[in-house]
Amino acid sequence: MKVEILYPEICNLFGDTGNMRYLMSCLRDAEFIRTAVPDEPRFMKSEPNLIYMGPMTEKSQERVIERLKPCRDRITELIDKGACFLFTGNSMEILGEYIEADGTRIEGLGVLKLRSRRDMKNRFNSLFLGKFENMEITGFHSRFSSAESEEQGFAEVVRGCGTNAASLTEGVRKNNFFGTYLLGPLLVLNPDFTQYLLKLMGSEARIAFEDTARRAYAARLEEFRDPKRHLD
Amino acid sequence: MGSLRFYFALWCAKLIKLLLVLIGRKGTYFSGKAAIKICPDFLGRIGKPGTIIGVTGTNGKTTVCNMITDLLEAGGADVLSNRLGSNIDAGVAAALIDGASLSGRCRKSVAVLEIDERSARLVYPYVKPDYIVCTNLFRDSMRRNAHPEYIASVLTEHIPAKSKLILNADDLISSAIAPGNERVYFGMERLECESEARENIVMDISSCPDCGRTLKFDFRRYHHIGRAGCECGFASPEPDYKAVSADFENMKMKVLERGEEREYSLISDTVFNIYNELAAVTLLRELGKSPEDIDKALQRTKIVRSRFREESAGGKKVTMLMAKGLNAVACSRGFDHVSSEQGRKIVVLMYDDIFDEKESSENIAWIYDADYEFLNSDDIVQIIPCGVRALDGKLRLLIAGVPEDKITTLRRESDVAGAIRYDDADRIFLLYDVYRYEIALKVLDEVMAKIREVQR
């Protein structure tokens, strides 16, 4: 079992390293490959069971786009083949067509039909409750950008905001590629989804610390469902 | 000054302040808020003192502000400050209102203003400090501050061109703000007692800002604080005021000031408070105060008791340690401090956001940026995550490798004193969020009462 973490030295904002820490607890024998910015991604020559990238600063997005440009075709190939990807926060924007920012356009990799717009004067914060298949997804948004997408959404919006203010879905799902604006320890917060992802990755393992994780999830769900509690 | 609207705003604000005082409310920023609402450019019109000192940065600004104010007051200055109030534009306005006469003229000679980084765009167009101290820039609340690169860009855009900056040379992010401004750096050599930092989760700068290569640290104190360089020639700036040694036994530090060695009394034995003290000393030296006068005042200064407090009974020491909740770096500093202390220890965690627990649900992402791993050590025998997010705290601790039998989850703080395994430890640490001070104080009393009861 191999998990590739892309550019962890810069794609690590907002507690997202919690995802990989938790996965390490779930998959104690797995190899976690930390690919640094100067290195060639491992997925260029092999097929890890999961390729993960977390959120980054806006400047770092441009750097990552430059680094991943030569990998564009391989990423497309892997997504088409059904390889597992989890891209959180603004990292999915990297794979989109472009990012619009202050009147300029930063070309993305064009792997996804997704166009994002950044507004550094307005930060959007919200809790999120959604549905993915028969699972409830909880998470947090904290972002400067939103996106238009023609891809299938990752989760239906139950409470909170989707990929953009008018969208009924959040994020992108393309085969086993999961992209979401949700950030923070998504896998820790969502035991059902994590169990589902482990299976997709080809593991029979149970999620780590299952009892505590499920009790914390249940407590959070109760709060997220409560209409008296505000989301922002 | 001038304008009928300004005077109306000033008098309304003064009246509001008076009414708040009469009904016993602190009202630390309401008067300022009202004044700005009535007169949007109120901050530009109100009278200001001859010297204005601004203090900003992620961590330590309140401590530095308090030190500077205390040290200036000890020297006889009539200081206006927002030390008891808010650090946003309304708090700054409220402080200036307090210091102004009914005609709007300032009655004080110096202002020491804590200014929230994000309020830069609202404050600096009107209030142009002669000096701005920036303590450091770290990852802070993601909702408010996004990330330090963003905050650095906000400060660079809004800091007035005439402000002289007092900056931390050991912080590659804050030391680079407003590059066109005149600046003085403070910093700290590796102290004799210091070992290389343990790995921190948060490392907000790891690549060279000039060429993008991976930075090489000669010495990393914690997170990105330390001395770094790159093969392209980029390097941390050289401090003008550099602490070269600290003697914790006699509570003294030696500071090399542009080549000349001076000695100052230390007011705390923690490294992050030495940085705070250095920032204050650098500012005062730049204001022309003598090292002797500064040292005399330092000898009478203490860290505010709400931030750090210790009580002992029955051979047990109980320590209250405040940190901003939602701020992973501040909490990690606390964890580092606890783990470096001697003895068998029990740690109580009271970091839940007091507002979200009632009205929303806390974004707990920050706890995965905080170094809970530091609490996974043999001499920490019990950890008590407490509050509505106790289960999240427990899960975080389990992921950090803490054995489950060491973790006690509690929903209410009132149960802490009864849940502590007193026989197992001689040190008890109460770690709490800024807004939980009163609650933590109550827990302290209950724990001390329990210790005394056991003693009898």
Image: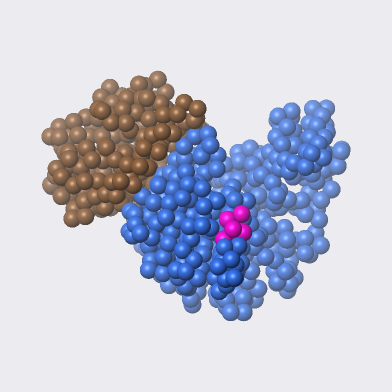
Chain colours: A brown, B blue
Q: Image quadrant for the N terminus of chain B?
A: top right
- Res B31 quadrant in image: top right
- Res B228 quadrant in image: bottom left
Say above or below: B297 vs A3. Answer: below
- What is the chief secondary structure element of the magenta stretch? helix
- At x 44%, y 36%, the residue is A142
- At x 22%, y 43%, the residue is A51
Does the segment drawn in magenta span residue B444?
yes
- Res B9 quadrant in image: top right
Give, as a single range, the part of the protein colored magenta.
B442-447
**Depth check: B2 or A195 in front?**
A195
**Residue B10 in sight in this render:** no
Q: Residue B403, image x and y in percent?
A: 33, 60
Q: Residue B133, image x and y in percent?
A: 62, 55
Say above or below: A116 vs B328. Answer: above
**Depth check: A160 or B78 in front?**
A160
Number of marks present in the image shown: 0
Q: Residue B89, image x and y in percent?
A: 66, 39
Q: Image quadrant for the C terminus of chain B?
A: bottom right
**Residue A221 in sight in this render:** yes
- At x 79%, y 39%, the residue is B23
Q: Residue B277, image x and y in percent?
A: 62, 64
- At x 46%, y 50%, the residue is B410
Left or right of A118 on screen, residue B9: right
Does the segment drawn in magenta span residue A186?
no
Left or right of A194 on screen, residue A143: right
Say above or below: B401 vs A225. Answer: below
